[in-house]
Image: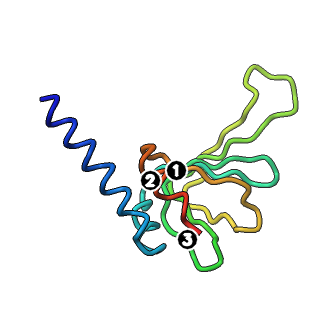
C-alpha cells in the first residue's frame, strides 16, 4: 500500500514536471472548472469556478461569490453576495489564485 502511494506521488511529480513543457493553452486548459480567487484593485475578491480567459487576459468565473470589506462596525468584517457568471477585466485584476496541489502550482508558475 505504501509503495503504491509512493509510486503515485512519483507519477504526479513526473507529470507536473512535464507540464512545464506544455503550451500556455494546454496549461490554462488544466485550470478549467477549478476554484479561483481573484482580487481586484478596489479591494474586492471573487471566488468562483474558472470558465475561460481571452487573449487580453479577461477572466470569466461562474458560480461566483463576491467578498468585500465593510468599513462600518459590524459583527462580520466582510460582506458577501452571490453573482453567478461574471467577467473580470485584466485591468482591474491584482491577484489570482487557483485551488490546486503544490506540484501543480509550481508547474503553473511559468504561465505568462
Residue hosting label 2: 34
The image shows residue 71 at horizontal and vertical percentages of 87, 33
- In this orientation, which residue lies closer to the viewer: 101 or 11? 11
Give the CA separation, mark 2 to mark 3: 13 Å
Residue drawn at point x = 70 percent, y = 68 percent: 89
Question: Residue lying furthest left in this view?
Answer: 1
How packed mark 3 is, by other alpha carbons closer than 10 Å (few <14, some 14-19, many 20 or more), is some
N-term mark: 1 or 2: 2
Give the CA separation, mark 1 to mark 2: 7 Å
Q: Secondary structure at mark 3?
A: strand
Q: Are marks 2 and 3 in contact (CB under 8 Å)?
A: no
Quarter of the picture containing the C terminus is bottom right
Residue hosting label 3: 53
66 left or right of 1 in image: right
N-term mark: 3 or 1: 3
83 left or right of 102 in image: right
The image shows residue 44 at horizontal and vertical percentages of 74, 47
Say how the picture is coloured.
rainbow
Residue drawn at point x = 62 percent, y = 54 percent: 96
Residue drawn at point x = 64 percent, y = 52 percent: 38
Residue hosting label 1: 98
Q: Nearer the viewer, mark 3 or mark 1?
A: 1
Q: Secondary structure at mark 2?
A: loop
Q: In the rendered view, would you say 74 is above or below 80?
A: above
Amino acid at each position: 500500500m505504501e509503495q503504491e502511494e509512493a509510486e503515485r506521488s512519483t507519477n504526479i511529480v513526473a507529470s507536473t514536471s512535464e507540464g512545464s513543457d506544455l503550451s500556455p493553452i494546454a496549461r490554462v486548459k488544466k485550470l478549467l472548472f477549478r476554484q479561483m480567487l481573484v482580487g481586484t484593485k478596489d479591494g474586492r475578491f471573487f471566488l468562483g469556478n474558472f470558465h475561460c480567459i481571452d487573449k487580453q487576459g479577461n477572466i470569466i468565473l461562474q458560480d461566483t461569490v463576491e467578498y468585500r470589506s465593510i468599513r462600518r462596525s459590524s459583527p462580520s468584517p466582510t460582506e458577501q453576495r452571490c453573482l453567478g457568471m461574471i467577467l473580470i477585466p485584466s485591468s482591474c485584476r491584482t491577484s489570482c489564485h487557483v485551488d490546486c496541489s503544490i506540484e501543480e502550482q509550481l508547474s503553473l508558475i511559468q504561465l505568462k
